Image (cartoon, rainbow, N blue to C red):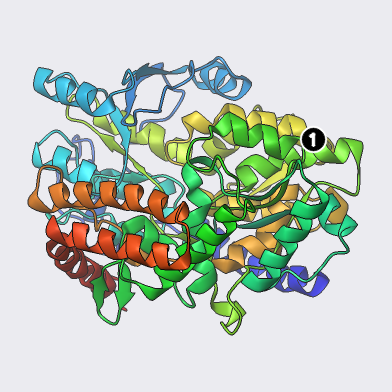
Amino acid sequence: MLMKKNRFLLILAALLTALLLVACSDNDTGTDPEEEDPDTTQTGDDVADGGDEEPELFEIGSEPLSLTMFGNYDWYTMPGWGDDPATANIKELYDIDIISIDGGGNAAQRLSTMIVDGNLPDFIWTDKGADVERLRAGGVLVPLDDYIEKYPNLKNWISEDALNMLRSEDGKIYQFPNWYNDQPFGNAGWMVNKEIYEELGSPTLVTTDDLYEYLKLVQENYPDVVPLEVGVNAQGVNTIYSAFAEGFSPADVGNQVARSGDQLTSLFDSEIYVESLKFASKLFRERLLTQDALTQTRDDVVEKVHTGRVAVFIGASPTDFGGDGHYQLVRDNPDGGYMFVNPIHKEGLDPNAIHPGDYNQTGWNVSVITTSAEDPERVFAFLDWLTGPEGQMLSMYGAEGEYWDGWVEEGVLPNFTDKYVSDPEGLTEINNGTLNFQWNGNSKFLDNAKAAFELQLPEDEINWTTFWQHEILWETQKDETEFVGIGPLPDSEEAIVSQRVGEIFEEYRAKALMASSDEDVESVLAEAHEQAMAVGYQTLLDWKTEKWQENLDRLGN
């Protein structure tokens, strides 16, 4: 572990030096400024053209700022801005107020009503791609290109590849990304109950055969423990795909495609997918995989993890549960808690080519500014400030002086306090309290800031999640930026097919999981393939292949 940590610190030091040089550089393009009226205020366009005058920026906190936002998700309800310590501090320091428009459990309908009424919020938090393109085509979005050039943070932290992947067909950028990063990140992997594992003799857990034998051992010795947990809606079953997929990731399953040379083909016809579901179904039949995989709630999973009634957890982000669960368990047993093991894989596959998770450089979702905003530049100024170092520290770690206090290197390396180490539960509470305000998180800044501080601490003082991110998780995630934006526009022929295929996917994945034999799994997926082809799956695959190849060209692959 020490050699790995030292190697990472050397890489990190080089990266941070580069970031400091970027932060200190100016934005002059070197072109000659056009002759202009000296009394005219310079605009974003002038900045892009290389004007000599400094652009006139809206300074956060110079006057009150009240913005409206809409989270375009049925599950999303924004907590009250200012009701938690972090946003209350931002509100007090900078006189910023964010007012949420609630979707009422039917976000699409609420958004459609606002579009028809012509009364949209200042910004909308939504998925990349199709949702954005529908709004853009309707003429209700503000392009961000000039603001990106004018304000400092987004352009300094995001990669050029990621920005290009965010461009719409008209060549402009309308999307402000959330959790973007051009370095590996993500928390998918295999989490193991350390106490149970050690009590059973710490057996080898490398291959799927090893896993099967270990889960049977758990079942025999701990009848009240779930041998393998897969999270809500059996999400971890998708992640199991990675154990059989050398060089691929569960992004295939998420996009309901298989990769074959330069073509995207049927997932249901993929040998990798069929084999992964055979394995999952076998575990389910033998009660080695949680029996309420398709019906349990998040609270059900939390309760099991927090009480130590899970032996192994596979999923896209087990740290969401293990971060709190680990500290709950080590209260009673300092040597217990949870740990991660290297990605489990089928015997004979290259362990270095197994990727239980994926990431893309543009991150998760995006914020878009609408034409209803009275002053769209001020909206962008807020988003740019929030994605910058100060905004990220205040929103993630609360008021300055508690878990952090000033800067070691201004805007690059924060000065974390002793409380950051001594109060992990309080820190987690601050982080969790602002999860639903993270509309444009800056993974690159936060990941490097934490790493620069925590990886110099003694191993037992490093935050549990951070430790495992650097020990195993991040280096096993795969960059799948090539899949950005391959979802079709709503109401298009491809979108209608995509919806039908998605319904078939959910229905037949459940049938395969509950199948009575390997042969039954094959039969179920063969039927799924036929059903999907009958509703136009091949047309969708051809369309997605074209978009995928365009992305590969953009990325220079």
Residues 537 and 57: in front is 537
| 98 vs 183: above or below | above
Residue 192: % across, % down: 73, 55
**Residue 51 visible in the displayed image:** no
Dot 1: within a 10 Å radius of its alpha carbon, few (fewer than 14), some, or many (20 or more) residues? some
| 476 vs 295: above or below | below
- Quadrant of res 166: bottom left
Q: Where the C terminus falls, by quadrant?
A: bottom left
Give me the residue at 60% from left, 25% from top. Answer: 86
| 304 vs 487: above or below | above
Residues 215 and 29: in front is 215
Give me the residue at 41% from left, 63% from top. Answer: 521
Q: Which amino acid type corresponds to the residue marked 1 in the rendered image? A: Gln
Residues 125 and 240: in front is 240
SS of the residue under disc 1: helix
Q: Is residue 346 left or right of residue 233?
A: right
Give me the residue at 66% from left, 72% from top. Answer: 209
Q: Is residue 349 left or right of residue 364?
A: right
Residue 46: % across, % down: 21, 48
Residue matched to label 1? 328
Residue 421: % across, % down: 81, 41
- Quadrant of res 374: top left
**Residue 25 visible in the displayed image:** yes
Q: Is residue 223 left or right of residue 460?
A: left
